[in-house]
Amino acid sequence: MEHKAYLDMELLRFTTAGSVDDGKSTLIGRLLFDTKSIFEDQMEAVKRSSEKKGIQHIDLSLLTDGLKDEREQGITIDVAYRYFATPKRKFIIADTPGHVQYIRNMVTGASTANLALILVDARNGLTEQTYRHSYIASLLQIKHVIVCINKMDLVDYSEERFDDIVRDYKDFAAKLDIHDIRFIPISALHGDNVVHRSEKMEWYDGPTLIYLLETIHIASDENHIDCRFAVQTVIRPHSEDYHDFRGYAGRILGGIFRKGDEVMILPSGFTSTIKAIQTFDGELEEAFAPLSVTIELNDDIDISRGDMIVRVNNKPEVTQDVDIMVCWLNNNPMQLGHKYILRHTTREVRAMVKEIVYKIDINTMQRQEGEKQFAARDIGRIRLRTTAPVFTDPYRVNKHTGSLILIDEVTNETVAAGMIV
């Protein structure tokens, strides 16, 4: 029974973001260390590496920086996913790089997160990367942001310095679409206010970081109103036991599906009713986002990968003209009239850049109109025309049906991440 309770524990995904040397990897190392989520042999290896580098203390950042180049240069290059658990919750952390050229890795790490930890060096205050990462968190509709003002030990644990940074960030964040922002003064190196309350900052009476991570409310982050099921594959066993079985496997992207519900299949528009909802553990009476299930229907309808099962009276927009906020991830610039592969849920179509509406200046949040191309790391709004219909919701309504990626037809590289407006 204990094992079942552990499996049923709520999972919080969070990403770290901030400038280079703000202490993201050290903070995660500190979380893992202080929650006793590290094996002894891992700790021994980190101790040995720290001694080799001539560091007096244990370098906790080595717990996440797994690539040889990362350890040698003391930087994070790729997204490092780390898993840990406390008695209250399970966690998946995406430790993302701070360097501006690795912005695509930050977008990747943030795309599935419930929460963003944004680190600010108490000595430097807000930087361009703070603005960029906060804006991306806002674009990706991450509902919860914790601003960790790190290295408080290097500013003598000054309450005044903490208040100055909080005020600056609040002024900037007023232009963003983030509703839940918390601030914590920490020292990742010494563990102040990470897992254990700091004795050096008695002026701070808020929660520790781990307490916030364990208690922040995320259950209502999924859309349980608009029913969306993207078909991933059709299951036809052709076995003696399941001779006539035809099921549609995929992930529920929104809403609640129940046995007997009347549903519509897009793009055909045919309707049917749900005969059964199957999982590996048996049949369910109802299923909701983000479960992966197999749906059986009462009618034989031609359905294939990329189709979507929805409610008859609650449909996404079926369109070939898509307006998106895009984060350009490739070194080759995006140009008007260029064609790309567009991947949206399980559907893949070709798309052409019809119009560049504007680019965003990250520092001033001003719109720059009349642009003819997007360079690497540019963010802005574009219009696409697709060769076949896609079934979309605004990103703010449903992250899964409101997001897409663009892929270069020649190199097969992911060149952009887009949020449907």
Image: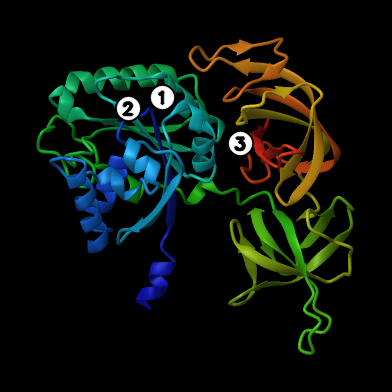
Label 3–label 2 contact, CB within 8 A: no
Q: Quadrant of residue 36?
A: bottom left
Q: Residues within 10 Å of mark 3 (few under 14, many from 20)?
A: some
Quadrant of the drawing holding the N terminus: bottom left
> What SS does tag 1 mark?
helix
Amino acid type for the residue under numbered disc 2: Val
Residue 344 drawn at (x, y percent): 72, 44
> What SS does tag 3 mark?
loop
Q: Is residue 276 above or below residue 144?
A: below
Quadrant of the drawing holding the C terminus: top right
> What SS does tag 2 mark?
strand
Amino acid type for the residue under numbered disc 1: Thr
Q: On residue 396, which mark appears?
A: 3
Q: On residue 95, which mark appears?
A: none
Q: Quadrant of residue 145?
A: top left
Q: Residues within 10 Å of mark 1 (few under 14, many from 20)?
A: many
